[in-house]
Amino acid sequence: MDSQATGGTLRFFGDLPDPRAHNVIHKLHDILVIAICAVICGADGWAEVEEFGRSKQNWFKTFLDLPCGIPSHDTFGRVFAKLDPEAFERCFTAWTGALPSTTGGWKLIAIDGKAIRRSFEHGWDKSGMTQLVSAFVQANHVVFSQLAVADNSNEIETIPRLLSLLDLADATVTIDAIGCQRQIARQIVQAQGNYVLAVKDNQPTLHEKVKKLLDEAILENFDQMPHDHFESIDGSDHGRIETRRVWVTDQVQWLGDELLCQWPSLATLAAVESKREDLASGKIGTERRYFISSLTNRDARAMANAVRRHWAVENQLHWQLDVSFNEDQRRIRKGHGAENYSRLCRLALNLLKQDKSVKIGIHGKRLKAGWDEPYLLRLLTT
């Protein structure tokens, strides 16, 4: 492969171990490049990856070896089913770690899980469905890392493995209630990061005390209790008005020494209230959520941003993977195939989001990459 094509993204995948022991007639590097390009341009399965490769074979010959032409879809499927997902992830994480930062030395990392809904083997048994946990950096709008939940395991066991792949120094990590675990908080603090963890009934004692303390403080308007407050209102563009109110206090001593000593560096507590008014029906719904954090500054605006941006992972990652990359409808089930194909999609999404040379959406960029070979090559080599 020529120096231009090896000078960008693909150099981080040069050491990826080949899972094949013998009868190797197609180079792993060629298989990986064709697959990445095909997924960027809209391929949605191994048969489409093969067809894309054959349609672009003359172009691929200008920078790939292709000793036996384009691999078959069965070859793509077998290789990615056997490819070590953690080795693939280490390459992926090395690449994302080298991406230009737009965070100015501060980053918010949202940890969230997602199931690939049609990755199970049989319709009557969904226990084999692939579950993924991703780390999404909101400021860059990119996925920094991703791991699958192992069989007979859960997200609680996967999150620490994912965090160990990341540079958490000066980062704030946000996790939903499933990640509100003492060992996870300790791991983040030991890596010189901060945490904002949602508190719910999976931590019953903590949830009861935080809820009681903050509810009573709000009712009494935080009488003689140091705190900060922030309120924002979203307009009626969609026929409803949403008012968000956030209260933050650093008076964590009211939780008691026994509870405080269990949660490393716990410094602030927060309540986030969302009040939604439907203008058509006049119905009003109110929800209040609770959080613990190691952030020492009782800054309600910053807490509101952290909590709200955590949910950007749903719109800026999961939604795009479902809509733009059709992830929930994909039927790849053998070995590590579903997880590794999803990683190809996240790699493609990161490349497309990082490109600022054209001002069109992800769908338009994928079409352009399929039509415009210099543009596709630029995506790979930037």
Image (cartoon, rainbow, N blue to C red):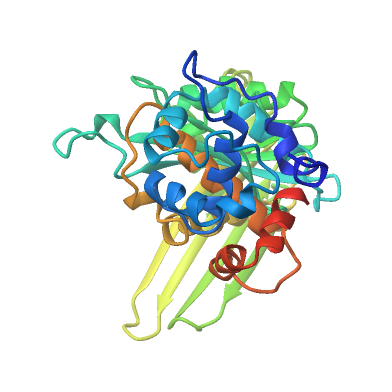
Place of residue 117 in the rendered image (x, y in percent of width and height, measured from the top left): 31, 45
Q: Residue furthest top?
A: 21
Does residue 365 appear to the left or right of 206 in the view shown? right
Residue shown at 47% from the left, 42% from the top: 342
- Please tell me whether residue 55 is drawn above or below residue 36 in the rendered image: below
Residue shown at 40% from the left, 84% from the top: 279
The reply to whether residue 187 is visible in this rendering is yes
Does residue 355 appear to the left or right of 126 in the view shown? right
- Please tell me whether residue 12 is drawn above or below residue 157 in the rendered image: below
Residue shown at 13% from the left, 36% from the top: 124
Place of residue 213 in the rendered image (x, y in percent of width and height, measured from the top left): 54, 41
Does residue 111 appear to the left or right of 152 in the view shown? right
Does residue 106 appear to the left or right of 240 in the view shown? right
Residue shown at 18% from the left, 35% from the top: 122
68 and 168: which one is in front?
68
Which quadrant of the structure image shows residue 14?
Answer: top right
172 and 166: which one is in front?
166
The reply to whether residue 94 is visible in this rendering is no
